Amino acid sequence: MKSYAYLFLSLILFTSCLNDDDTIELQTEADIIKYINDNNLNGIKTDSGLYYVINEEGTGNTPKDDSVVNIDYKISFLDGSSLGQSESEIIELRQIIPGLREGIKLFKQGGEGIILIPYELAYGLSGNNTGTIPGGKVLVFEIKVNVADYLLENEAAILNYLDTNNLIATKTDSGLYYVVNNEGTGANPTSNSNVTVAYKGYFLDGTVFDESDADGISFNLNQVIPGWTEGITYFKEGGDGILLIPYNLGYGVYGNNTIPRVSVLIFDVNLKSIN
């Protein structure tokens, strides 16, 4: 499916200035109501002026303001003109237009339906700067929520991994899980320490994506991913164990060339020395 993910970028990034001679044909609430009636929909209005239709309620969690979700979507105007569609699109809710952000939060995981977004909650009077969405237009999104919150999804996957592998881990306030196999001796490093660590990094399915040699490598803990900055401080010199790192403490929503998006990372670590 062709993706038009650029449509999800923030209102601020995608609005452009109106010229004095620009004319706008505003679509109003009356147009939304006509669309709902013409299509025999059971539309519900929110306090903001958004309308939505729930075709499938879904189960489990609903997204929050700062959630990262996975949705399928089709987007069109009220006249049925298509603006594109995508399957399995990963979206940060805090980065999208207000109406879509509000609308997605009305659905549980597995839920499906329609969101009708008035121009005030979409691209305003200016439209977007590519010209594909004129000012004053209502947007119609047909959506299915595949994953309502990747942090919860990551945690469920980590807990399943721990259970399957008979591991007992400690969870920290940040959401990091760690297992101490050998505590080591001496002092713990701080988040600013330079350390030497031997490690193996792999995904939940066991696929190795990075590994040092037995002597390890040296680095400053304030220059690595947050899960390492925090996690290595739980070991003393000579200690070893496992770090289980959710995406927000690893390589984030978008990953990198070797790390897929929103990935849980597992590291076997051995703190060789505090330098």
Image (cartoon, rainbow, N blue to C red):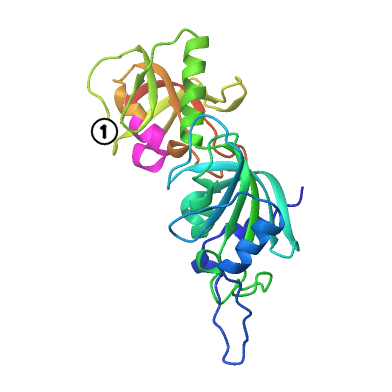
Residue displayed at 61% across by 62% down: 33
Residue displayed at 56% across by 45% down: 254
Q: Secondary structure at mark 1?
A: loop
Residue 88 part of the magenta segment: no
56 with respect to 174 (left or right): right
Q: Furthest-bottom residue in view?
A: 21
Percent across and percent down for residue 243 are 42, 23
Q: Main secondary structure of the magenta part?
A: helix
**Quadrant of residue 23 in the image?**
bottom right
Residue displayed at 46% across by 43% down: 67
149 or 57, nearer to the observer: 57
57 with respect to 199 (left or right): right
In the rendered view of the protein, which quadrant contains the C terminus? Answer: top left
Q: Which residues are magenta?
A: 220-230
Q: Is residue 155 above or below residue 52?
A: above
Q: Is residue 240 above or below residue 191?
A: above
Instruction: Count up the numbered dots.
Output: 1
**Quadrant of residue 175 in the image?**
top left
**Quadrant of residue 269 in the image?**
top left
Whether residue 259 is visible here, answered yes or no, is no
- Which residue corresponds to mark 1? 190
Percent across and percent down for residue 28 are 57, 71
Percent across and percent down for residue 240 are 38, 16
Residue displayed at 71% across by 54% down: 39
Q: Furthest-top residue in view?
A: 166
Q: Residues within 10 Å of mark 1 (few under 14, many from 20)?
A: some
Whether residue 104 is visible here, answered yes or no, is yes
68 or 234, nearer to the observer: 68
Residue type at mark 1 is: Thr
184 or 38, nearer to the observer: 38
